[in-house]
Image: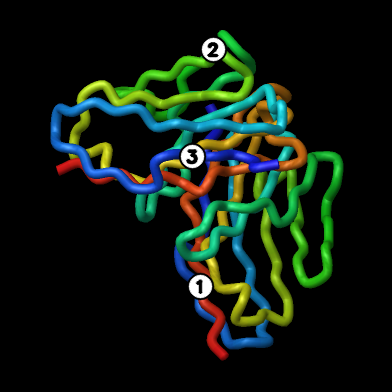
Amino acid sequence: NAGVTQTPKFQVLKTGQSMTLQCAQDMNHEYMSWYRQDPGMGLRLIHYSVGAGITDQGEVPNGYNVSRSTTEDFPLRLLSAAPSQTSVYFCASSWSRGGDYGYTFGSGTRLTVV
Amino acid sequence: GENVEQHPSTLSVQEGDSAVIKCTYSDSASNYFPWYKQELGKRPQLIIDIRSNVGEKKDQRIAVTLNKTAKHFSLHITETQPEDSAVYFCAARGGSQGNLIFGKGTKLSVKP
């Protein structure tokens, strides 16, 4: 099993550009989520999904869109990149929304917006 | 919604000493409290968790305690080793169907 796979690992964007961060898991987890990690701010929830076709907003959803067409994939779209979106992004999956038995995190995407 | 406060933000100890990290939560309905360890440049990984019907849980050198009345929980690491150096995150799950909300993290440095 590959676990949770995130691509790309690094990305530099210009302000106003759009892009999609990819996340795929092969553990048949129903729950998937996106977090951003900023220095001194911990992990903040952007969007989450409890199953294919179901998504909802987390703590910091503005400027991001998600969709969940399959159980395996949960891409995160930046609509018009801003410097404030410079961060490390982690995708996570779990058997349950509440994280029983732990979240499996991807290796992260380091995004810089200039 | 749930809010999790974590202290201290940085902690430096000598090898062999104990380290304690404390977290408080706001939602009295929260019932699940995991701790994650993130080594430099790596992804967070679950190291221990506790549920609201348990007061303490141990796993070798790591223990977690929970005080539901005061709404706080703590991570205790004994006989610290250099490989314990990392950022530690506490988290709380709001209610029975809530998402995990993370604290801001504690950077632990263990000096040889």
Residue located farthest toward the top when viewing the structure as drawn: A53
Q: CA distance from mark 3 to mark 1?
A: 31 Å
Residue sitting at x 63%, y 19%: A71
Residue sitting at x 55%, y 24%: A73
* Of the pair B100 and A13, the residue shown nearer to us: A13
**Residue bearing the label numbered 1:** B11
Q: Position of residue A107 (x, y in %)?
A: 51, 48
Residue A8 has which mark?
Answer: none
Q: Disc 3 marks which amino acid?
A: Gln
- Give yes or no for contact between labels 3 and 2 (Cβ–Cβ under 8 Å): no
Specify the color scheme: rainbow
Mark 3 or 2, nearer chain start: 3
Question: Vertically, is B99 above or below B15?
Answer: above
Host chain of mark 1: B
Q: Position of residue B81 (x, y in %)?
A: 65, 81
Q: Disc 1 marks which amino acid?
A: Leu
3 and 2 marks on the same chain: yes
Question: Vertically, is A94 above or below A90?
Answer: above
Question: Vertically, is A64 above or below B20?
Answer: above
Residue A69 has which mark?
Answer: 2
Q: Position of residue B42 (x, y in %)?
A: 51, 58
Host chain of mark 2: A
